[in-house]
Image: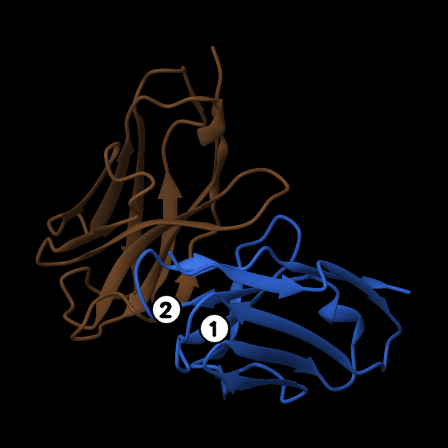
Chain colours: A blue, B brown
Amino acid sequence: DIQMTQSPSSLSAFVGDRVTITCRASQTISSYLNWYQQKPGKAPKVLIYSASSLQTGVPSRFSGSGSGTDFTLTISSLQPEDFATYYCQQSYSTPLTFGGGTKVEIK
Amino acid sequence: QLQLQESGPGLVKPSETLSLTCTVSGGSISSSSYYWGWIRQPPGTGLEWIGSIYYSGSTYYNPSLKSRVTINVDTSKNQFSLKLSSVTAADTAVYYCATSDYSNYGPYNWFDPWGQGTLVIVSS
């Protein structure tokens, strides 16, 4: 199985801050990396697919980069509605696996 | 626009079989464009992929659950289902159904959309 490791597991930030979350795969996954946002009591929602493609309807302040084993999700200017938990997911091989999540909280 | 909705018992006894159904609206489950999947999330923890199915019946299961999992498609009802046998408290989770775009190689894409999720508690 491909292990996905996210860091940090949690962070506190101010509205307007630039936030970066990293995800590392235990083996190369090319660009088969997706990012989700999950708010309490809700299903995850895809933000970025294939490492850097912005899902339709997702604000442009979200961006993704990376390939191989190291990936990054960046929020350029954190908004109040962005406080949530973020997960990465590899879709390179089965079993499909997710990172442990990064909880973004208000500072 | 596809919409998915999970349904099934919210309480299952240990050693019994958990059975959930996902009803698809806004599109056909027989579409060649999608895989249909199940993902679960134990309370307060992360996400675990359970498995995915294509309308033709081709299935992909997480090896950690494969011996206990069956996913089926019912094209007449536009539904797909999950059965998980011999459940224990460790199977307590919110269960989501979701779809991913078809790929020649398998269910190797992101999940979108998801159902709202249903909490299943395993307890006597």
| Quadrant in which residue A30 is drawn | bottom left
Q: Amino acid at mark 2?
A: Ser
Q: Residue furthest front?
A: A27
Dot 1 corresponds to which residue?
Answer: A34
The answer to whether B100 appears left or right of A74 in the picture is: left
| Of pointers 2 and 1, the one earlier in the residue sequence | 1
Q: Residue at x 81, y 61 (%)?
A: A105
Q: Residue at x 19, y 63 (%)?
A: B28
Is label 1 in a helix, a strand or a loop? strand
Q: Secondary structure at mark 2?
A: loop
B107 vs A43, nearest the viewer: B107
Q: Is residue B117 left or right of residue B74?
A: right
At x 54%, y 59%, the residue is A99
Callout 2: 10 Å neighbours few (<14), some, many (20+)?
Answer: many
Position above or below: B116 against A89: above
Image coords of residue A56 (percent x, y): 48, 84
Name the spot of residue B47 as percent of width and height, x first. 50, 51
Q: Which residue is mark 2?
A: A91
Q: Is residue A64 above or below residue B44?
A: below
